[in-house]
């Protein structure tokens, strides 16, 4: 059980991750305004990479770091940064609005790219990124 320190670590990390997500989303939307939800896609894929990298780096430490680091960085920051709920809503809207190919590309592409990015992040950690 993480106790109060674990909750505080997640709380602090999620705030930082949420602000980072908002900033990246604004930056993407400034340059792209198409029907594909590119901002959410890029945020989720980069978040999967970062989560894989951070988790991999933390797992390699000897002695292992306090679990609060994992809670802060992976659960908090990356949890606040990535967004499955927005992915779901944007995919639903594409279906509702008749953009079936975009909805399918977003759903399949997000899952495949997210898993691949997490694996690449973990591999980068193993190679001493």
Image (spheres, helix red, strand yellow):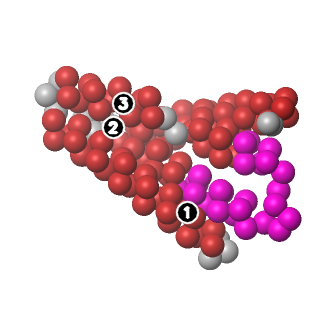
Answer with mark 1 or mark 2, whichever residue precedes in sequence.
2
Tell me the crowding category of disc 1: few under 14, some 14 to 19, or many 20 or more residues within 10 angstroms, Cα based.
many
Earlier residue among tags 3 and 1: 3
In the image, 12 versus 61, the foreground residue is 61
Magenta residues? 49-72
Q: Residue at x 61, y 60 (%)?
A: 53
Q: Which x, y percent locates residue 46?
A: 50, 52
Q: Which residue is mark 3?
A: 88
Task: Give the number of the disc on residue 121.
Answer: 1
Q: CA distance from mark 1 to mark 2?
A: 23 Å
Q: Which residue is mark 2?
A: 37
Q: CA distance from mark 2 to mark 3?
A: 11 Å
Looking at the rendered image, the disc whose residue lies closer to the viewer, 2 or 3, is 3
87 with respect to 4 (left or right): left
Q: CA distance from mark 3 to mark 1?
A: 24 Å
Q: Is residue 59 above or below residue 86?
A: below
Residue placed at 35% from the left, 26% from the top?
A: 89
Query: Do the numbered discs 3 and 1 sit on residues whose CB atoms are within 8 Å?
Result: no
Q: Quadrant of the image for the C terminus?
A: bottom right
Q: Position of residue 25 (x, y in %)?
A: 47, 37
The answer to whether one can see residue 30 in this image is no
Where's residue 104, x and y in %? 22, 42
Main SS class of the magenta portion in the image: helix
Q: Which residue is located at x 54 percent, y 33 percent? A: 22
Q: Secondary structure at mark 1?
A: helix
Q: Quadrant of the N terminus?
A: top right
Crowd class of label 2 (few under 14; some 14 to 19; many from 20; radius 10 Å): some
């Amino acid at each position: 059980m993480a106790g109060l320190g674990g909750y505080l670590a997640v709380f602090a990390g999620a705030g930082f991750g949420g602000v980072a997500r908002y900033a990246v989303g604004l930056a993407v939307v400034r340059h792209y305004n198409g029907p594909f939800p590119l901002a959410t896609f890029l945020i989720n894929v980069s978040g999967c990479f970062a989560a894989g990298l951070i988790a991999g780096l933390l797992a390699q430490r000897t002695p292992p770091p306090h679990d609060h680091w994992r809670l802060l960085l992976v659960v908090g920051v990356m949890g606040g940064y990535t967004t499955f709920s927005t992915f779901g809503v944007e995919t639903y809207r594409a279906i509702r609005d008749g953009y079936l190919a975009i909805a399918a590309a977003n759903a399949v592409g997000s899952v495949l790219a997210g898993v691949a990015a997490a694996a690449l992040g973990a591999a980068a950690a193993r190679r001493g990124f």
